[in-house]
Structure formats: structure tokens, C-alpha cells
Image (tube, rainbow, N blue to C red):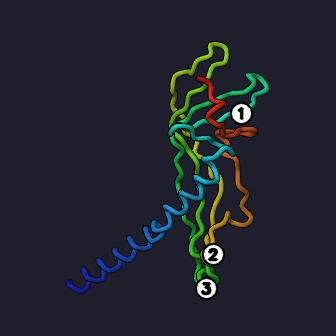
Amino acid sequence: MKYFIAILLFLLSSFAYSQNSNSKYDNEVNQLANKMYVSTKYVGICQGRYFYSKNSPTWGEIFAEITKPEFRLEYLPVQEHDRLNGVEFRVNVYFDYKSERRYDQKTNSWGDWGPFSSEVRTTGFEKKKGIATPMSGMPVVTPEIIGRGGRGVVCSEIPK
């Protein structure tokens, strides 16, 4: 019975380690995702607040403020041959935020905050031989929640 418990504990600890073994890369991947998406390219940051703009054929330019973007990371298996070739990790990155409000150009005021959740896989990263890059064969996708033509804004553009 002692041997059974010892083996069971060993197997459980090995499983827990394998499930969390990529967490050492979380900070690095989050920094890569932030650098790619939280910029004037897709989501702008001004005084600790997050904004984007996009053009709508119906409403013209739309300004929106969103809560801090979040990135969910999904690590993909790295096989032995990949490790031998220098691959440290492969990860899908999902972009999301929880609330947004839009600027109403007719009333020149910000609307109320509303719930928003539309997680989208936006890209993936691979770290090989010490260099992390977007995974080959996987395009960098504009988060669909911002949409085509969406861009980050600079502070001087934000309506008061």
C-alpha cells in the first residue's frame, strides 16, 4: 500500500508539473502580445486608459474606451524533435476585454459602460533558439472585436 501511494503521489506531481511547466514563459508571452496589440496599431493607451477608433460607413469615426485588454495563453505541445531543434514553446494568444463604452458624436459625450466579451485568437508565438516570433503559417490577426480599420489612438485624438 505504501508503494501504491508513493507511485500515485509521484504521478500526480509529474502531471501537475507538466501542466504548469510553461508558466515560466507567461510574462514573456504577455509582453510580446502587449507590444503587438497595445500600441497605436490596435489599442492605444493614454494615462492608463485604453482606446481604439474605427471608421464605420454608417456612423463615421467611432471612438471607444475599453477595460484593460487580457490575453489568454494556450500552450501547444512541443515534441522531442522540436526541442532538439531549439523550440522552447509554441503558444496561441487570445485577446479579450470585459467592458467598453463609446463616444456619442451627436451628444459629444461618452456613453455608459457595457459588458463585452468576445475572445478571439489573434496570433501565436514560437520561441526557437532563444528568439520569440509570431508562429510561421499563422498570420497576425487584428482582433475582430475591434474590427477592420480599427486602430489605436493617441491621447490628443481622444474626445473629452
The answer to whether mark 2 and mark 3 are in CB contact below 8 A is no
First-in-chain label (1 vs 3): 1
Instruction: Pick the residue in front: 11 or 52.
Output: 52
- Residue 154 higher or lower than 74, as above or below: above
Residue density around tag 2, few if under 14, some if 14–19, many if 20 or more, within 10 Å = some
Q: Amino acid at mark 1?
A: Lys
Q: Residue furthest toward the left?
A: 2
CA–CA distance between discs 2 and 1?
35 Å
First-in-chain label (2 vs 3): 3
Residue 54 is marked as 1
Q: What residue is disc 3 on?
A: 84
First-in-chain label (2 vs 1): 1
Q: What residue is disc 2 on?
A: 128
Q: Quadrant of the image for the N terminus?
A: bottom left
Residue 42 is marked as none
Q: Amino acid at mark 2?
A: Lys
- Residue 13 left/right relative to 51: left
Residue density around tag 3, few if under 14, some if 14–19, many if 20 or more, within 10 Å = few
- Residue 149 left/right relative to 129: right
- Residue 10 higher or lower than 141, as above or below: below
- What residue is at 75 percent from the left and 30 percent from the top? 55
- Residue 42 higher or lower than 112, as above or below: below
Q: Amino acid at mark 3?
A: Leu
Where is residue 85? Give x, y as percent: 64, 83
Where is residue 70? Give x, y as percent: 52, 47
Instruction: Pick the residue in front: 11 or 147.
Output: 147
The answer to whether mark 2 and mark 1 are in CB contact below 8 A is no
Q: How many marks?
A: 3
- What residue is at 59 percent from the left and 79 percent from the top? 79
- As helix, strand or loop, the secondary structure at mark 2 comes to strand
- As helix, strand or loop, the secondary structure at mark 3 comes to helix
Please identify the quarter of the rendering in which residue 31 is found: bottom right
